[in-house]
Image (cartoon, rainbow, N blue to C red):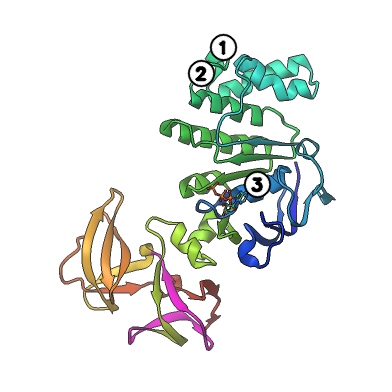
Amino acid sequence: MAKITLDNLAHSYFPNPTGEADFALKELNHDWADGEAYALLGASGCGKTTLLNIISGLLTPSQGRILFNDMDVTASSTTDRNIAQVFQFPVVYDTMTVRDNLAFPLRNREADAGYIAMRVQGIAAMIGLEETLDRRARGLTADAKQKISLGRGMVREDVNALLFDEPLTVIDPHMKWELRTQLKQLHQQFGHTMIYVTHDQTEALTFANKVVVMHDGRVVQIGTPQELFERPEHTFVGYFIGSPGMNLIPADVEGKVAKVHGASLSLARAYGALSGKVELGVRPEFVSLTEDVGLPVKVRRVEDVGRHKIVRADLFGSEINIVAGEDQSISPDMTRVAFDPDRVNVYVDDWLTEGEAA
Ligand code: ATP
């Protein structure tokens, strides 16, 4: 397994980039810890595949270096990097049996026949393909073929890293959950360094110990699911993660007081003079509807989603979302919202600003 270092890394698909906007991947410096499970999460086009392909060696970065265990591999081929990669769509040998497909990466490395048989059997059990081991891959469903691809990616124990690019796209929804859980178990069992690309926050948050959130070619935060929930470092993280995402409320902030459309509310921390676009970020879970405390709102809609209710309300002409308890009744007298001061984050030009404990 390997620690992966991204050193001054950036990539532009243009031969002569003239500015930041020309970079699909903006400059990035980071150490990815050996044996950690990472998810690369972000909307379509934010640069996830570009970064993954640079790590795997399918793409040479236009700037910077990539190191595996402190060895520069920027110019090394995918094979020399000793990584396994699973793509969005199946890559299988149609004329081979499932067994031979799974054994292929091990035979290629001239592994011992007994070891191959044992390993193939174990992987087939994990991905639910034991019954089809002796069938040819041709004629199997896309779902089954993708399981073969996953199995082939996981069959070798000696890889430096396992890379997955939206690997569950073609998998049946109920099987997705099962495979994701199995991948997580595999990580716990073998401690591979894993990088999993997805645009689906549930997939990212359930699979990974560390989630790398990307936005517009930039890594905006690397954190545990809890850190991303509690302290989004960028408004995009707040908005993209959570259901519904974090509320963003334009405000003026001075010291420990925020003013929203002239109405004042207290903050838990003190802030110096802030210039630029200032916003309060507060997750719907930390907003409560009240009768007499807080900012004035008008409830528009209440959605019962089972475990809780989502209240959609109007705050000075903009939507604010509130998560209320399943048993909480929402009365017409509830015309105000209060925020848990410890849970209010302050953003300047989309980036989190740390206040001082007062
Ligand atoms: P998706 O989830 O849709 O695959 P992504 O987050 O993986 O998106 P990338 O595929 O890395 O994003 O693309 C990042 C940006 O680079 C996009 O604007 C895309 O149009 C551009 N891009 C990707 N591949 C190429 C290429 N071969 N040539 C030119 N531009 C490219």
The N terminus sits in image quarter: top right
Three-letter amino acid code of the residue under disc 3: Leu
Which badge, 2 or 3, is on the more N-terminal residue?
A: 3
User: Which quadrant of the structure image shows residue 10?
Assistant: bottom right
Disc 3, disc 1: CB below 8 Å? no
> Residue 135 has which mark?
1
The residue lying at 47 percent from left, 31 percent from top is 171
Q: Locate residue 251 relative to residue 116 in the image: left or right.
A: left
Q: Is mark 3 within 8 Å of ligand 1?
A: yes
User: Which quadrant of the structure image shows residue 186?
Assistant: top right
Three-letter amino acid code of the residue under disc 2: Leu
- As drawn, the residue found furthest toward the top would be 134
Q: Locate residue 296 relative to residue 121 in the image: left or right.
A: left
> Which of 245 and 264 lies nearest the eye of the viewer?
245
Q: Locate residue 163 relative to residue 287 in the image: left or right.
A: right
Three-letter amino acid code of the residue under disc 1: Arg
Which residue does the numbered mark 2 point to in the structure image?
140
* Residue 184 point in image, percent of width and height: 57, 38
Q: Is mark 1 within 8 Å of ligand 1?
A: no
Which residue does the numbered mark 3 point to in the structure image?
52
The residue lying at 74 percent from left, 19 percent from top is 115
Disc 2, disc 1: CB below 8 Å? yes
* Residue 228 point in image, percent of width and height: 52, 60
Q: Is residue 282 magenta?
A: yes
Instruction: Magenta stretch: give its range.
Output: 260-283
Which badge, 2 or 1, is on the more N-terminal residue?
A: 1
Q: Secondary structure at mark 1?
A: loop
Residue 299 in the image: above or below residue 277:
above
Distance between the alpha carbons at the discs numbered 3 and 1: 32 Å
